[in-house]
Image: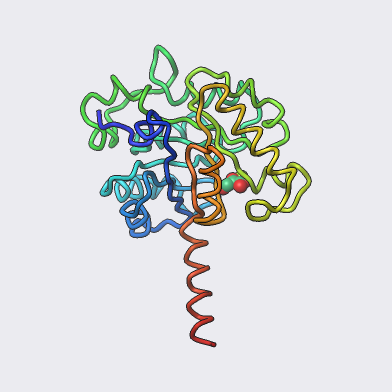
Amino acid sequence: MRKNKVKEIWAKNETALCGWIATESTVLAEMVGASSCDAVVVDLQHGASDMHNLLGMMQAISATDAVPMVRLPANVPETIMKALDFGAYGVICPLVNTAEEAAALVTASRYPPQGGRSFATARVFQYAGADYFDHANEEIIRLAMIETEEGLANLDEILAVDGLDGVFIGPTDLAIALGLRPGPEGTHQKLEDAIAHIVARTKAAGKKSGIFASGGAGAKRRKSEGVDLVVPTAELYLFKKILADELAIYHS
Ligand code: 3PY
Ligand code: MG
């Protein structure tokens, strides 16, 4: 089976750099995959993509060396299984509140006997190789998003779930959960403390943490803080920023 590059990076205790696609553009997904990013996430929760175009998005990322990943719309077994069948090598599940919810994510993404994933010779075999069934349970990445008060309170129990690779911090929802207004890195000490706590507990559990950042500088900062997978924002926000910068030059 084709190896999961993010897992190889983690095995060396290094940080993976991850792109994030909010549009449904296969061209942009391929472009981000061909950058220095190690992985690309297609966002099915807040992004424009859905199950109807996900297969094409996975193919576009597969044309590059980046690992195709998905942020799920919700913790729904049918959706998890289909995203994996289409070629996702990693799933990030939003709004995980309890260990039971994290366990359900793991179960849906593991073939029996460890889990309850249904088998079909799906498109992923084209990408992964004929022995996908034998190694998928180990190669696939499963991250539970910590972005609610309840998820934060249950962090240690969530981290203890067998088969869960770790957690992904949603700083925007987490800020709101803490009664704060979202902002870039360093805006609120209370949020920074919560993030540092999540990163430290995750390391103590021998698992991996990921986070969404506000740009290259924010991602670099999170890497220096020990986060294992950093997302320096989504392609949509980058476009907006570059467009504003270029038009400001024009109008100046
Ligand atoms: C959040 O910040 O809440 C996220 O879900 C990151 O995309
Ligand atoms: Mg969120």
Quarter holding the N terminus is top left
Is 42 positioned to the left or the right of 3 in the image? Answer: right
Is 116 positioned to the left or the right of 75 in the image? Answer: left
Residue at (61, 21) in percent of width and height: 100
Residue furthest to the top:
113
Residue furthest to the left:
130
Residue 247 coordinates in the image, percent (x, y): 50, 80
Residue 199 position by quadrant: top right
Residue 107 coordinates in the image, percent (x, y): 48, 21
Residue at (54, 46) in percent of width and height: 45
Residue 66 coordinates in the image, percent (x, y): 33, 45
Is 24 positioned to the left or the right of 74 in the image? Answer: left
In the rendered view, tell whether residue 105 sits above or below residue 189: above
Residue at (55, 52) in percent of width and height: 218
Residue 147 position by quadrant: top right
Residue 24 position by quadrant: bottom left
Is 199 positioned to the left or the right of 119 in the image? Answer: right
